[in-house]
């Protein structure tokens, strides 16, 4: 082994470093302000939609589910108000997922991790759990004092027990509401009261109850910092014009006492750290653990107001404006003149730029494609499957028979009789739809659709030896014709195969 191949010896300090660090418990402090009010409004809207949407009704006619939003596993349907999505139309769901992903990309390019800080389910439920925790155990200082006690009193144990009972109640409601998206909500509620619920439903409800309790009650910021992949590649979505929660160090540094004329506006009170749900110090710059919730803005603005100084030491700011303000205030001592110069150096935020236009164009393209797909969507579709084993059958008289399966998927809720027409075959060819006895006026076999389902029929096409087409594969067109003589309801093409000469 050469000298270059030898591994470096670890320094004594490196050997002493643990592979895993213990979790530092975060005790977020309550805060009031514009950002906090916005977060409360979004939290109420998100939770209200989640818990109430399964109870909305939508009349679809007799023998149809009347729940507005329902994933009907038994029928293989996704009901969304007037829209009914079948399994073979999964591309609509794919389009919605793509639309949601690109929307999050666009929001990140504009405002940083605003999704994480305001609307992510982990953030919403964790905020709710922390609110309950403050109601029962008190604010930051009270919780810290209680947890640092060597022994808890009976009142302390009662508060802890009450908190976890409330968390479990919220978790049960969350798990139950999730299951209601897959089964009729009023029916499930009645079954729960009468204790007549299947083990499958109870199992899924218990699963989501457990995940809600663990992730929102215990894991909390660990989910955002370690479990979620989004922080790992969010930097690729940002540029110099992206707004993100930032500390204006050109105004706050150097830190010092409020009465020190040589110090900046930051008095090192750590209010921004105390209210952070992930425990980061925003003054250290952009960090992976920062979810852009903006609570540090409210905390800092409150301190600045008490000190009689302008708000905005911590604010939604762009990297470009931070650099411009820093350059403009480099030679100006701390004080009102420095603050005014820094704010004057800022450029208007450019929301509509090349990156965001790309996202807008992508979202518009997906929406347009989905709307076109819905506009040209046919209520009745025909799929023809030719047998592949064997491809054809040679009869005793030398003729060739091909067998097909006709699948009629009808999105409507009423039965319709349709005549089957097979075109493109050579003269003398005979075809037959099995198990069909009715015929229309012209002698074509009549098949009946299956309302809100798929009807299957077998079709045999036989060509005598003297009429076999010259080509190995002959195009065949199959039409479903209404009895009133109007345009075909559905058309499909296939081929008739014969052996090589």
Image (cartoon, rainbow, N blue to C red):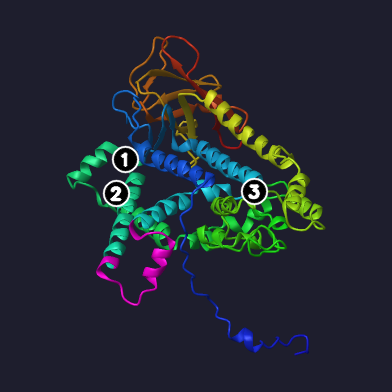
Q: Earlier in the sequence, mark 3 or mark 1?
A: 1
Q: What secondary structure prevails in the magenta region?
A: helix
Residue 177 lies, in percent from the top left, at 34, 44
Looking at this view, name the residue that lies furthest to the right: 331
Q: Callout 1: helix, strand or loop? A: loop
Give the extent of the magenta segment.
Answer: 136-156
Residue at 35% from the left image edge and 48% from the top image edge: 174
Is residue 170 found left or right of 107 in the rendered image?
left
Residue 236 lies, in percent from the top left, at 68, 53
Q: Which residue is mark 3?
A: 310
Q: Callout 3: helix, strand or loop? A: loop
Q: Quadrant of the C terminus?
A: top right
* Contact check, label 2 and label 1, Cβ < 8 Å: yes
Residue 220 lies, in percent from the top left, at 46, 60
Residue 86 lies, in percent from the top left, at 44, 34
Q: Visible in this render: residue 408?
A: yes
Q: Earlier in the sequence, mark 3 or mark 2?
A: 2
- Whether the magenta-drawn stretch holds residue 119 is answered as no
Q: Earlier in the sequence, mark 2 or mark 1?
A: 1
Q: Which residue is mark 1?
A: 183
- Whether the magenta-drawn stretch holds residue 148 is answered as yes
The vertical placement of 335 against 88, above or below, is below
Res 256 → quadrant: bottom right
Q: Callout 2: helix, strand or loop? A: helix
Q: Using a 10 Å C-alpha cutoff, classify the residue at mark 2 as few (fewer than 14 neighbours), some (14 to 19) or many (20 or more).
A: some
């Amino acid at each position: 082994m050469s000298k270059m191949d030898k591994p470096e010896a670890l320094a004594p300090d490196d050997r002493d470093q643990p592979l895993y660090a213990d979790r530092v418990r975060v005790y977020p402090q309550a805060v009031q302000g514009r950002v906090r009010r916005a977060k409360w409004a979004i939290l109420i809207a998100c939770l209200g939609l989640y818990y109430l949407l399964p109870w909305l009704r939508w009349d679809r006619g007799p023998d149809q589910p009347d729940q507005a939003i329902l994933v009907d596993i038994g029928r293989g349907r996704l009901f969304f108000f007037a829209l009914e999505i079948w399994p073979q139309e999964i591309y609509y769901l794919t389009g919605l997922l793509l639309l949601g992903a690109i929307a999050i990309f666009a929001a990140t390019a504009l405002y940083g991790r605003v999704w994480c800080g305001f609307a992510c389910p982990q953030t919403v439920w964790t905020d709710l759990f922390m609110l309950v925790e403050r109601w029962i155990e008190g604010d930051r200082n009270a919780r810290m004092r209680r947890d640092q006690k060597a022994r808890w009193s009976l009142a302390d144990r009662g508060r802890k027990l009450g908190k976890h009972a409330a968390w479990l109640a919220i978790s049960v409601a969350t798990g139950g509401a999730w299951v209601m998206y897959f089964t009729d909500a009023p029916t499930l509620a009645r079954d729960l009261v009468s204790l007549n619920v299947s083990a499958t439903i109870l199992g899924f409800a218990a699963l989501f109850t457990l995940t809600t309790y663990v992730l929102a009650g215990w894991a909390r910021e660990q989910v955002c910092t370690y479990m979620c992949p989004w922080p790992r590649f969010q930097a690729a979505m940002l540029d110099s014009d992206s707004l993100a929660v930032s500390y204006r160090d050109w105004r706050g540094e150097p830190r010092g006492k409020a009465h020190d004329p040589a110090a900046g506006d930051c008095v090192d009170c750590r209010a921004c750290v105390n209210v952070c749900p992930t425990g980061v110090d925003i003054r250290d710059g952009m960090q992976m653990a920062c979810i852009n919730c903006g609570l540090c803005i409210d905390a800092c603005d409150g301190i600045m107001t008490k000190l009689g100084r302008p708000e905005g030491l911590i604010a939604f700011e762009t990297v470009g404006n931070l650099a411009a303000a820093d350059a403009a205030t480099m030679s100006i001592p701390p004080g009102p003149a420095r603050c005014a110069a820094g704010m004057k150096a800022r450029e208007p935020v450019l929301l509509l730029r090349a990156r965001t236009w790309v996202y807008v164009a992508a979202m518009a393209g997906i929406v347009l494609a989905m709307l076109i797909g819905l506009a040209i969507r046919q209520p009745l579709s025909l799929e023809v499957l030719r047998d592949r084993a064997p491809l054809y059958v040679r009869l005793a008289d030398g003729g060739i028979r091909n067998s097909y399966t006709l699948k009629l998927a009808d999105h409507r809720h009423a039965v319709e009789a349709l005549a089957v027409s097979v075109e493109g075959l050579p003269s003398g060819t005979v075809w037959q739809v099995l198990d069909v006895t009715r015929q229309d006026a012209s002698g074509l076999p009549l098949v009946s659709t299956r309302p809100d389902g798929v009807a299957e029929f077998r079709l045999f096409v036989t060509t005598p030896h003297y009429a076999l087409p010259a080509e190995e594969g002959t195009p065949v067109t199959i039409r479903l014709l209404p009895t009133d003589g109007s345009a075909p309801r559905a058309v499909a093409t296939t081929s008739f195969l014969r052996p090589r000469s």
